Structures are given as structure tokens and as C-alpha cells.
Amino acid sequence: MADQLIRATAADGGIRAVGVITTRLTEEARQRHQLSYVATAALGRAMSSSLLLASNMKREGSRVNLRIKGNGPLGGLLVDAGLDGTVRGYIENPRVELPPNSKGKLDVGGAIGKDGYLYVVRDIGYGYPYSSTVELVSGEIGDDVANYLMTSEQTPSALLVGVFVSSKGVSASGGVLLQVLPKAARDESLVALLDSRVSQLSGFTPLLRAGKTLTEIMEQLVGDLGLSILPEVQMVRFDCRCSFSRVLGALKMLGEAELRDMIEKDEGAEATCQFCGEVYKATKEELTQLVEDLRAGSS
Ligand code: ZN
């Protein structure tokens, strides 16, 4: 099934539900960054979470950055997702591998670390991003993002994200977010009900691997609560906004002395985009042109 996102409501608008499939884009991230199994699971869960978080923003161009810094061996990770369905991200130590945890699953919590912080930045495009920080709960990412939504955005939320990866690559990735909206937030029983519904599932990826669609998963979760699925199916994809001209712009900022040094010593420059792993090469001639541009600009 293609990578996609669907939105729904239930309980007379008291519940907001969003589901996302990110199998292909997680596989693309795995290949681009040569991620280990546990790093694939961590980045995939974070990318699904960020797309789910971005899905309730209103203004075109809105984006969410989610940064996790724990005390585990993966170091930090950063993902950036847009309301338009694009997402990108990277991990500090992408090749770290850990043995499975006591449940026989990829040990994302151990790899991220239980002590640390989750930073969320919501940018609605006005130039004043809203940022918030919470302590990590488990490092498993889903719990941490749900805790962020409860404590920082005061929205009781049940979030389930998962990635299934093997030697053949990523065969299932995605997640579902159920939120109790302000009009129903005083209804404690509703919050408890959503939590129990999500915890009754054995995970998100077993459902996908069994051939269930997002609609069917939503129906299984809250189909008896007056579920109404919005008709629009939004495509989601790995997409980075880097380009050669942006790289040249960054090189230019280094200044003339540094550029001359690169021209003489290295006969060019090479820059790798951290977000997508794309390698950009600038030749001696292109660097010389930058120096000339700088001189023209300063005269
Ligand atoms: Zn890039």
C-alpha cells in the first residue's frame, strides 16, 4: 500500500483520528543514511510521529520539527515534517545496532535512552515558531510524543507508531494518533477508552503486514464510536529541500579567505546534506565564481 495519511473524527467531533503509512519513505531513509535496524525503527517512528503532528496544522507551509536527544548510543535524531506530507530526518549515529529487548523487539528505547529530552517546534510560517520541551518517558518515541501532546499541548492522546524491518528492508511502517479534543476532554472515560483500544492492539505493523488498510485499522479502533473518515487521502513522501544553489549559498557565507583555501588546497568543495545524505560537489571554477560574486558585492 502506498505511503499515505488519512484523517477522521468520531464521538460527534470529540475524537480526532489520523493514520499514516510510511513504509516506502522509511525504506528510503534507511537506504539514504545506511541505517541499522534499530536506527531504522527509531527514525521511522519519529517520521511517522512528525507527520501525524503536522496533520492538524492549518496554514499552508506549516512544519513540525521533532528533535530527540537521549543518553543512548544513537545520539540525537531530528525529523522535519510538513502539512504538505513531506518529511525528512537523520540520526547522529546511524549504524549503531543493539540486541533485541526483553520482548524480542528492536530496542528503540535502549538505543535512544530513557534520560533526555524531546523538543518540538511548530512553525506556522509567521516567523515565530512555537517550541516546547519535555523529558523523555521511555525513549520508545510513541510514548514520548503522546506525553508531549498531553503535557505541552493539553490534548490527551493515544499514539501508536511502529516499523517492521528485516534483511529485505522495511516492509511496514506507520502509525495512528487518537486525540480527545477540548469539547470532550473532560470526559475521562473517553480518554481511558482510547488508551485501552490502542493498548489492545498488538502493534501497528502486524495489522499492516496482515494486509489491513488505514480505514480498516481506524474502524477496528473506533468504528463503534461514530467514526467519520474524511474523503481526502493525502500522499506522504521523503523529501528534502536541499539543492545545489543552497549549497553554493552556504559556501559563499564562509567568506573569501576560506573559499580561496578550498580552491588552492582541495581544488573544490564537497558538502553532504545531513537530512538526506545527498552529496554536492563544487568545482574550483564554481568556487572561483563565488569569490568573484563576493568581490562584486563588496565593491
Ligand atoms: Zn537534503
Image (cartoon, rainbow, N blue to C red):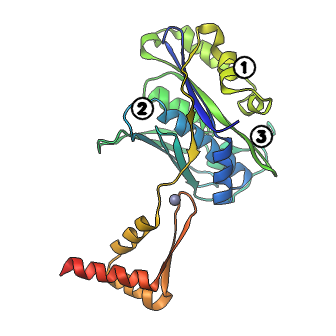
Residue 101 appears at what percent x and percent y? 77, 42
Say if 10 sits above or below 65 in the image. Answer: above
Distance in Å between CA atoms under marks 2 and 1: 29 Å
Residue assigned mark 1: 200
Mark 1 and mark 3: Cα distance apart in space:
17 Å
Give the amino acid at mark 1. Gln
Q: Quadrant of the C terminus?
A: bottom left
Give whichever of 120, 122 is nearer the camera: 122
Label 3 Cα neighbours within 10 Å, binned few <14 / some 14-19 / many ≥20: few
Identify whether 161 is placed above or below 252. Answer: above
The earlier-in-sequence mark between 2 and 1 is 2
Residue identifier under label 2 = 57
Q: Is label 3's Cβ within 8 Å of ligand 1? A: no
Q: Are marks 3 and 2 in contact (CB under 8 Å)?
A: no
Identified at 66% across, 26% down, the residue is 214
Residue 240's spot in the image, x, y percent?
51, 54
- 2 or 1: mark nearer the eye: 2
Distance between mark 3 and mark 2 Cα atoms: 33 Å
- Ranked by sequence position, the earlier of labels 1 and 3 is 3
Q: In this view, does 34 lie above or below 50?
A: below
Q: Report helix, strand or loop for mark 2.
A: loop
Q: Which amino acid does label 3 sit on?
A: Lys
The label nearer to you, 3 versus 2, is 2
Q: Is residue 163 in view? A: yes
Mark 3 or 2, nearer chain start: 2
Provide residue 174's location: percent of width, then percent of height. Answer: 65, 36
Where does label 3 land, which residue?
105
